[in-house]
Image (tube, coloured by chain):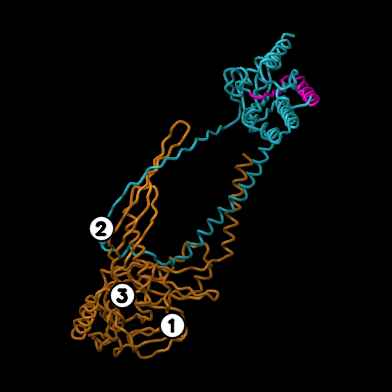
Chain colours: A orange, B cyan
Amino acid sequence: MADQITNYKCPACTGPLHFSGASGKLECDYCGSSYSVEEIEALYEKKDEQAAQAAAEAEQKAAQQPDEGEWAQPEGADWAEPGMKSYSCPSCGAELICDETTAATSCPYCGNTTIVPGQLSGARKPDYIIPFKLSKEDAVAALKNHYKKKPLLPKVFSAQNHIEKIQGVYVPFWLFNGSADADIRYKCTRSMTHREGDYDVTDTQHFMVYRAGTVEFEKIPVDASSKMPDENMDSIEPFDYKELKAFSNAYLPGFLADKYDVSVDDCAPRADERCKASCEGAMRSSVTGYSTCVPEEEHVRIRRGKVQYTMLPVWMLHTKWKGKDYLFSMNGQTGKLTGDLPVSWGRFWAYFAGIAGGLAAVLAVLLFAL
Amino acid sequence: MKKQILCLLAALMLLLGLSVSASAYESAHVFDYAGLLTDSEAGALEARCQDAEDTYGCGVYIVTVNDYSLYYDAGSIENFSEGFFLDFELGAGEDQNGILLALSMAERDYDLCAHGMIGNRSFTDYGKGVLAERYFLSEFGSDNWYAGFDRYVDGCMEFLQMDAQDEPFDQNTDPERLEDIGVLKWIVVIVVPLLTALVVCLVMKGNMKTARKQTHADAYIPQNGVRMLRQDDVYLTTTQTRVKIETQKSGGGTSVNSGGFSHSSGKF
């Protein structure tokens, strides 16, 4: 279990270090020095070894737990370390974690600027993390691009929301590992039509098709933050798990981290649902060469495996427009961005009238004048 | 004179040899062997048919029998109409222009048979269909024989008048159809743009919403993560359906057979 050191200091000037997604290094704001994570971790070898060992132990424990119909809960270490601080948002209830060099000025979920600082307690340390790869500039550019080619977007919306306030947040996720066994019976038909004199004759062959199999699943992400809309997180999937690393506080400087508040059990139905749908899809895709295929009997059994607690990088911007909340999220690793935009009904009806009027005029000329 | 003698002989043959109603009426244009009309009704129709022939040079005829198959070894009511038309030397002018409506009561068959240049030009395939549908079928369906024949003569007069004005009744001159097409055009001009604009605008509105829940986990199936344990396809049976191919005639005009006749027949 890691017990201390979260505030990484520059070996040259002792200034605070922050992680730069662009360079993939820890950079010092004061003297400009930069260090790879490995170099810094070597300096803090002992503590990091302890942290890595704790993470490995947690993973091993999770792997050893047999699946007997329940998702194996991770046994994370306590994250309440010196040098870590937390902020809570009185508006939406979000509890944000950061190192003492990072100042949180507003809540990334609801935009509230009066968030309250406090001491971190009762937080579970994540098993893994994917570090930010894209910078704030990348996020701002992606957001500006998101506003383009949206004819129904109110002009003043993009002008009035302050996209430079976009914040990098490590969002808590449960990664579900398991498999699903399927045994499905389909009723299928294959039709062939030929002509006999004045008749179209259709011969339809009827089949009973059986499919059974097993589908493995690795790291299905389900966000463990009640404040984060599931739609937003689902839409910025997938993350590249090749860059998944054992969790280290070295990746936190410059970013906020959200503390999970939705348990594995509460997230499990979503993982189950996705496993079942994909398992059914995999079986169905093996039924080929038929005109129709209707499942008649389905049995899907989910074999629940281990669950990993992971922090995934998300750039977030919250804004309000005419009393309604809008939350934009960008995958901090791949740049995939999502967020619903407001619709200008004036523009909607203007386009409607323009298209309908123009088309009516063309059709009137074609049908009556020519 | 010869024609009248032949008519009389033929009528005599029919009366003697076949089952002809006791109240059968026969004149130059109306041959009611099934006895559907009173003498006064038949006389009134005869007068109108004669008037049509005198005005437009095309005979308008009515023939009713109990069972067409007893005449001329006719295998169909079309054959009967043609046999009757030729046997009685019907038609006006050298071309034997005429339109004949034959009713056979046994199976409630009817046939509209046109002959000659004016006959086939005035009564196109489309026109004969309209004549039956709009003018007399509904009356015959209710056993209103005189009213049906009267409407038939009305229709013939209208069609012959249009032909006389060099605008024979057909798909492109049918006032009702043209009116329907006009209404349809307006519907197209109004409804299609509204629907198109609505679809386009709803698609644009849909593009404003990008956050959607995932329902599948396909991206998290590792390579070789799908193992099939059973794949059985069991054949059960074969069924067969037969659908008659509907041949739709496009365009207008009249389909004339080798005997110079054109027909439109059916049940009433």
Query: Are discs 1 and 2 less than 8 Å apart at CB?
Result: no
Query: For mark 3, what is the residue?
Result: A70
Relative image position of residue A352 (x, y in whole percent)? 58, 57
Q: Mark 3, residues whose alpha carbon is within 10 Å: few (<14), some, or many (≥20)?
A: some
Q: What residue type is labelled 2?
A: Leu
Q: With respect to residue B235, does A259 lie above or below?
A: below
Q: In which quarter of the image is residue B7?
A: top right
Label 1 and label 3: CA atoms lie apart by: 38 Å
The chain letter under disc 2 is B
Residue identified by numbered label 2: B229
The residue that label 1 is drawn on is A106
Are dots 1 and 2 on a single chain? no
Distance in Å between CA atoms under marks 3 and 2: 24 Å
Point out residue A245 in the picture as x, y percentages from the top left corner. Answer: 25, 75
Query: Which range is magenta?
Result: B39-67
Residue A282 vertical placement versus A8 (above, below)? above
Where residue A263 appears, as percent x and y from the top left, is: 36, 79
B131 or A308, nearer to the observer: B131
Frontmost residue, A196 versus B159: A196
Residue in the image at 68% along x and 27% along y: B168
| Amino acid type of the residue that numbered disc 3 sits on in the rendered structure | Glu
Question: Which quadrant is the C terminus of chain A positioned in?
Answer: top right
Give residue A237's quadrant in the image: bottom left
The answer to whether B137 appears left or right of A116 in the picture is right
Horizontal side, residue A11 vs residue B29: left or right: left
Indicate the chain on which mark 3 is placed.
A
Q: Label 1 is placed on what type of residue?
A: Ser
Q: In which quarter of the image is the N terminus of chain A?
A: bottom left
Q: Which of marks 1 and 3 is in front?
A: 3
Q: Is mark 2 on a helix, strand or loop?
A: strand
Q: Do labels 1 and 3 share a chain?
A: yes
Looking at the rendered structure, the secondary structure element under dot 3 is loop
